[in-house]
Each structure stands twice: as C-alpha cells, then as structure tokens.
Image (tube, helix red, strand yellow):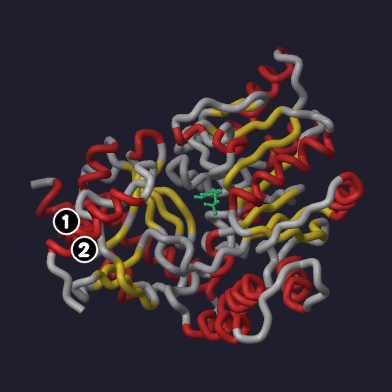
Amino acid sequence: MHTTSHEQDTLLARRQRVLSPSYRLFYDEPMHAVRSEGVWVYDADGRRYLDAYNNVPVVGHCHPYVVEQVAKQAAVLNTHTRYLTDKPVELAERLLGTMPPELGSVIFMNSGSEANDLAVRISRLVTGNSGIIVTDCAYHGTTDLLSGLSPVTGLPTGPGVFTVSLPPKMADAGEFRILVRGALDKMREAGIRPAALLVDTIFGSDGVVSGPVCFLKGAVDDVRREGGLFIADEVQPGFGRTGAGMWGFARHGVVPDIVTMGKPMGNGYPVASAVLRRELADIFGRHQRYFNTFGGSTVGCAAALAVLDVIENEDLVVHAAETGAYLKDGLQNLCKRHDVFTDLRGTGLFLGVQTPSGDVAARIVNALRRAGVLIGAAGRGNAALKIRPPLSVSRSDVDYLIGTIDDVLNKEIER
Ligand SMILES: Cc1ncc(COP(=O)(O)O)c(C=O)c1O
C-alpha cells in the first residue's frame, strides 16, 4: 500500500488528538512502520530500513518460529499461573539452566519495569534496609518507584536512592568500586543502610559502558558486606546480546542476587521475569503472595520458550560475538576517519559510539533514518550513538550499516 505524506500527516494529527502528549516519536520525520521481517522494518511506502536499534526483536522481527509457537499456543490455551500448566514450569527450568546454580527461583511478569519494581521490593523486604544505589544516567522503568531510580528521565530520585556518576571510560576495574564506596559512605552519613545496588550490566542508558571487564565485582562485594543485594538489570544486555554468554553479568565475574529481564524475552510479546536466589524467594514467599494476571501467561511463556529455542538452534550468542566483532571493527575504521566519532565502546551486538554532543548525535540519527538505517542515542546529554541490531544480523547487513554511516557522515555531517 502506498501512503502519501498527506496520509501520514493525517495519522500524526489523529495520534496527537487521541494519544497522551507524554508520548514521544523517534526522529524529526517520524517513520510510519507497517511491517517488519528479520532485520528490516518497512514503512507505509514500502521503503525498508535496517533496524540497528531495537533490542526487542532479538532473534529478528516476526521470526517465523516464534510467530508459529505464539499462534499455536494462543489457539490451545492461554491462562495464568493459578492453574497448573506446563509452560511456566518448562520456561523456568530452561531459564535456570542458563544461570549460575545459586539462582534457583523464577517469578514472571509482563515488563522490565514490573521485574525491577519487584526486585527492589524483595531487596528491601529481605535485607530490612532501604538504600538503593543506581548510576546517574540509569533507566530502570516506568512505575512511580522506578521513576525515582531512573535519573536519566530528569525526575527527582526517590527516598533512599543514591547515585554514582559513571565515567564512560574507566581507568581500571577499581574505579567503579571507589564510586560505589562513596555512595555507601553518603548513605551511612544519612543513617541509611543499603538494600541493593541496581545496575544495567552494559549500562545502555549511560551511553554503553562495557569495560574494563569485571569492574562491577569489587562494588558488589562492598554492597554485600554492608548487607545489600546486587540486582542485575538484564533488560538490555540479556539474551546473548553481549556475545559473552546469555547474561551481561557473566562478563563481570559476579553472581547476582536477583536478575531482571524483559524486552527481548518474548521477541516482542510482553513477557518478563525476575530470577532470584532460592533463599530470597523463600523469604519473600513466606511474607507475601505475588500474582500477576498476565505474568507467566501460557502464550507469553510459549513466546519466551521459542526465543530460547531460536537462540540455541541458530547459535546466536556465538553469532553475536563474531558479527559484533566484525561490526566493531567497521566502526573502529570509521572512528579513524571521522572526527565526530570520538570513542567506541561496547561488546557483542551492543555498541556505543561517542560524539561531541547531543546535537551532533541527533543530526546523525536523523540523517541515518533518512538514509534507511535506524539507530538511537543515549548517555549523558544523549551524545552517544546506540547501535543494537537483532542478533541474527548478517555480515552483509553490517556492511550496509557501516557504508551508510560512512556516507551520511561524509555527505551530511562533516560537509
Ligand atoms: C535497563 C532497563 N531496565 C528496565 C526497563 C523497563 O522495561 P519496560 O519498558 O519493559 O518496563 C528498560 C526499558 O527501556 C531498560 O532499558
């Protein structure tokens, strides 16, 4: 179907009339997406865009096997966790099989926000403490509690929340520990004890901070020594994206107390989870009940099981490592030739390219959209480009991505 720009303007006007102004559209010229397949998204004019941004369709948009498994299950049974059904048990077993043995219990929900919200609630319940440490560009979700733990939104931090200012490049693995010690000191001065350190293990909203490897470990030890837990937010790095195993925390040589996940878990179908140490689950279960109507629904679990099957069958973690290294090489070459690329970070298929300012990054993001490539920006002042194609991205897709970025920088940014 062909839409005129007039039709798109009409849709935009209708949207503005009925949807809350709190919504924001990507790009100066919004893209009217109508279908997607693999790494490609098609607009209403039939033009295709390489999706190098969205970490939700982790195994590729509309992966036929995931679509088939969702449709099959939807036609048979879709109910909740108060009935005895196979799928949530099967999914919990499969997820635990990807985790260190210390992590032994699973709770399902629908979104990363719900997972983090519950993780914070459990950490406060089991430790009896209230303090939470997050990074100062963190985003952890959309609930009232998590808005106070998501400084990147510009909203005030909540009670008992202490932030650390993460440099995009750390001199050594001890630097983060020193920062967290500072936060623990401030907490002590305020008469507060730590319930948890909560971080995205690839620090996506902080502009992708991937190294040095193991930089979380010392900080986690210090937080635990003072009675707090470590919550690993795997909503962005999880499901193989870093190419170093299924979970981002593995790169840091630490075993979390609670792991939260969402976005890629159902390849677009809403399903999320908190995976926790058995002893924490036991304490929580003794004190409180948890029921989430759609969390762990039969169809949601079927979607997540299908995603795990595809990651395994298509060897996507190894593919993310190899294709990610190829992409990083290509970006490294661009850094050598283009002054606006001042630093390159990341691992696997989660890469961040530093630019001098949010303005420059926005110009690049918008120019790429016009040229048929979708990426985003993040970090302090939104000055870092965030690049995260589906894990199924091929080398020829990467060549197209690098070629288009090169072209855009030459013709539109560095003229
Ligand atoms: C690191 C991180 N945690 C949590 C969330 C919240 O997930 P959701 O939007 O599924 O509630 C997000 C969403 O962008 C995220 O990036």
Q: Is residue 178 visible?
A: no
Residue 293 in the image: x percent, y percent?
Answer: 69, 61
Residue 55 in the image: x percent, y percent?
Answer: 46, 61
Q: Can you tell me whether the CB of the residue at mark 2 lies under 8 Å from the nearest atom of ligand 1?
A: no
- The quadrant in which residue 195 appears is top right
In the displayed structure, 318 sits above or below 207; it is below
- Which residue is depicted at the point 32% across and 69% down? 398
Kind of element beneath mark 2? helix
| Total numbered labels | 2
Spatial CA distance of label 2 from label 1 is: 6 Å
Q: Where does label 1 land, which residue? A: 408
In front of the other: 253 or 51: 51
Q: Where does label 2 land, which residue? A: 404
- The quadrant in which residue 317 appears is bottom right
State yes or no: discs 2 and 1 in contact (Cβ < 8 Å). yes
In front of the other: 404 or 144: 144
- Which residue is depicted at the point 79% across and 29% down? 129
Q: Is residue 262 visible?
A: yes
